[in-house]
Image: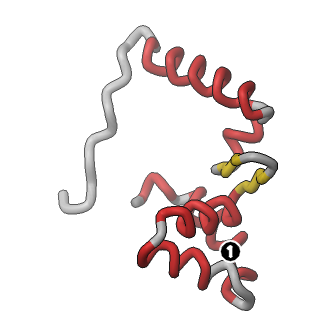
Amino acid sequence: MLGKHKPAETPPWGLGRLLKTARQVLVTQSVGLTPAEVSAAVWWVADEERLSGHRAVTRVLRELGGGWGIVGRVIAVPPLSWLGGPVYRWVATNRARF
């Protein structure tokens, strides 16, 4: 089907899940985040800046630059920024549909 893709196969013994979890633990420990925090939202961590959720997304977009940078700057300004949290939660909840 158009727009649908088959998810990557996970080995039956769970090695893929184990490796993914181990990598997440190493990364989260190195930046001072808990596995629960990482599971709950996307994060932007750089120097002293720690952003989660929609604020992290706008920061990533600004870093990408070009058209994405413009989008990141525009959606970070009220009144669009007020919609950031609800839109982020909706997309996160429904991400499997995309």
Quadrant location, the C terminus: bottom left
Question: Among all residues in the image, which is located at the extreme top?
Answer: 13
- Residue sitting nearer the eye, 58 or 2: 58
- Residue sitting nearer the eye, 98 or 63: 63
Residue 85: percent from left, percent from top: 72, 70
Name the image quarter holding residue 31. Answer: top right
* Residue under label 1: 84
Residue type at mark 1: give it: Gly
Color theme of the render: secondary structure
Name the image quarter holding residue 34. Answer: top right
Left or right of 77, for residue 24: left
Question: Among all residues in the image, which is located at the extreme left?
Answer: 1
Around disc 1, counting alpha carbons within 10 Å, would you say few (fewer than 14), some (14 to 19), or many (20 or more)?
A: many
Residue 22: percent from left, percent from top: 59, 17
Left or right of 53, for residue 15: left
42 in relation to 97, above or below: above
Left or right of 69, for residue 2: left
77 in relation to 57, above or below: below
Question: Among all residues in the image, which is located at the extreme bottom?
Answer: 79
- Residue sitting nearer the eye, 70 or 85: 70
98 in relation to 29, above or below: below
Residue at image x 31%, y 27%? 9
Residue 59: percent from left, percent from top: 63, 64
Residue at image x 64%, y 28%? 27
Residue 45: percent from left, percent from top: 70, 47
Query: Could you say whether the residue bearing mark 1 is in a helix, strand or loop?
Result: helix
Question: Among all residues in the image, which is located at the extreme front?
Answer: 47
Residue at image x 54%, y 63%? 63
